Image (cartoon, rainbow, N blue to C red):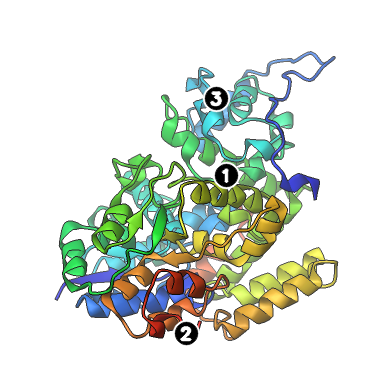
Amino acid sequence: MPEVSYYPGCSLEATARDYAESIEGVAKALDLELRELEDWNCCGATAAHSLDHRAALNLAARNLALAMEGPSPLVVPCALCYNRLASARHELMADGSLIIDEIRSLGADYASVEVMELNEYLTTPGMMALAQHKASQDLSGLKAVCYYGCQGQRPPRVTGKTDYENPRGLDRLLAALGVEVMDWPFKTDCCGASHSVARPDLVHALVARLYDRALQQGANCIVTGCQMCQANLDMYQQQIARQMGREVYLPVLYFTEVMGLALGLDQTPRWLGRHLVSPRGLLEGAGLPRQYWERL
Amino acid sequence: MSRTQPQPEAAPALPPPGEALRPEGRWLAEVEASSGVKAGACYGCKKCSNGCPLTFAMDLHPYQAVRLLQLGQMERLESSATVWICASCQTCLTRCPNQVDLPRLMDWLKERLHGRGEEVGEKDIRLFHELFLKGVAKRGRVFEGELMGSYMLRTGGAFGPEAMANARLGLTMLRKGRLKLLPARTRESRWRRALFKKRRGGSHA
């Protein structure tokens, strides 16, 4: 049974509970053991790196230290947490002088912790083959664009990725699970996540562009691996559609939820039921069995 | 809500009409040394600004911010909305042929402005970051419910015209099981106190 260290991050305990539950369900179905870091703390998110560089480094350093003992890699489902941990690791390998004693004493071998996005891990060839082998449900009625967002990809000197302008991991996974995957040019464009509270107008302008292009490509849903992207694209869809002056119906699914559908996991409707844009019409239209959508 | 729509992206003039620009050489070296951003390496190819998704809301395009720094125009740079509007999406740095770390420069400027405690152009953005960090200092984790509540109380979102819409969204999230009612905190707290205790001279080094 493969075993990895797991850093869920704060929002998976609340607004992204659907994501957290779907990850748990899929991991179980794939016999993947997620070892949650003991007593992990917030990564500091945008706030820390904006106002307090020292705090940003220390918050990440503590989580990296907690991961030093556990299995490798450290898998992170939230793109922003991932970016914060990977950026700090990159900087700390060169200079750890800002780390306070209370955190440094937990361990300082930052190079030893491999930080990986969850979607990167689940699209490694072995995991992908396993998912494909276990998939039973016909998903050919889903026409998806994959939205990776910005924080998981860039900058490449930190993420180590080579396909950062045109990532394809999720595209390959979904295609392997029988989804019709549409190509589009906005895979890694920013949704403005960190401004969703203070300047929602900016987020709405960015998200409107995404809807517009996804619809142009003929997609009937957007699949993402980042809970900030999911929230921004899901929570205000009707409001943004009104501003655009057109109808928009684009359920925003986590890739783990699509895996849940493909693997025929019973709990999948529970996760999907937490979305604001109900996937009912999508799933019914795509010909999925009634039990997946009747209670959405 | 005129500012919700992207405006045509006319680059602001530089320098402003009728104003002569007096280069101040010392700033570039000082900021480079303190922030670690090699802003002097910028030769103005504008790849940063062509890729930036938020130029429609900026008063300075990213390359102009760097150019102003090269010319030592700190006041214009620090009073710009651009510093706060940057969403740190890393597109500019990724595509920069000289690897000028613009997002880091923007963070460095924000931290400096924040440390001085002066009014900033985008005060709501700063307030949100501030409240967020306060929560992290208190618990080591974020409690979204409290963060949103205190932000709305401070900005009028709990009473103003958006109050009803906010309340409705809150209720929907609750019904969907996506609001956490009790905060989580880290068991270990010594590091938290050490990291966030008031340091002499403010938070900025």
Q: Nearer the viewer, mark 3 or mark 2?
A: 2
Please tell me which residue lies in front, B29 or A90: A90
**Label placed on residue A51:** none
Q: Please report contact status of discs 3 and 1: CB closer than 8 Å, yes or no.
A: no
Query: Which numbered disc, 3 or 1, marks the residue that appears first in the sequence?
Result: 3
Residue A21 quadrant: bottom left
Is the same chain shared between marks 3 and 2?
A: no
Please tell me which residue lies in front, A181 or A62: A181
Q: Is residue A77 visible?
A: yes
Residue occupying the point 73% across, 48% down: B4
Mark 2 burial class by Cα count in 10 Å: few <14, some 14-19, many 20+: few
Please tell me which residue lies in front, A158 or B114: A158
Tell me the amino acid under the disc marked 3: Ala
- Dot 3: element: helix
Q: What chain is tagged by disc 1?
A: B
- Dot 2: element: loop
Residue placed under numbered mark 2 in the picture: A294
The answer for how far apart the CA atoms under marks 1 and 2 are is: 48 Å
The answer for how far apart the CA atoms under marks 3 and 2 are is: 64 Å
Residue placed under numbered mark 3 in the picture: B29
The answer for how far apart the CA atoms under marks 3 and 1 are is: 17 Å
**Label placed on residue B107:** 1
Tell me the amino acid under the disc marked 2: Glu
- A125 in relation to A285, above or below: above
Is the same chain shared between marks 3 and 1?
A: yes
- A244 in relation to A106, above or below: above
Tell me the amino acid under the disc marked 1: Asp
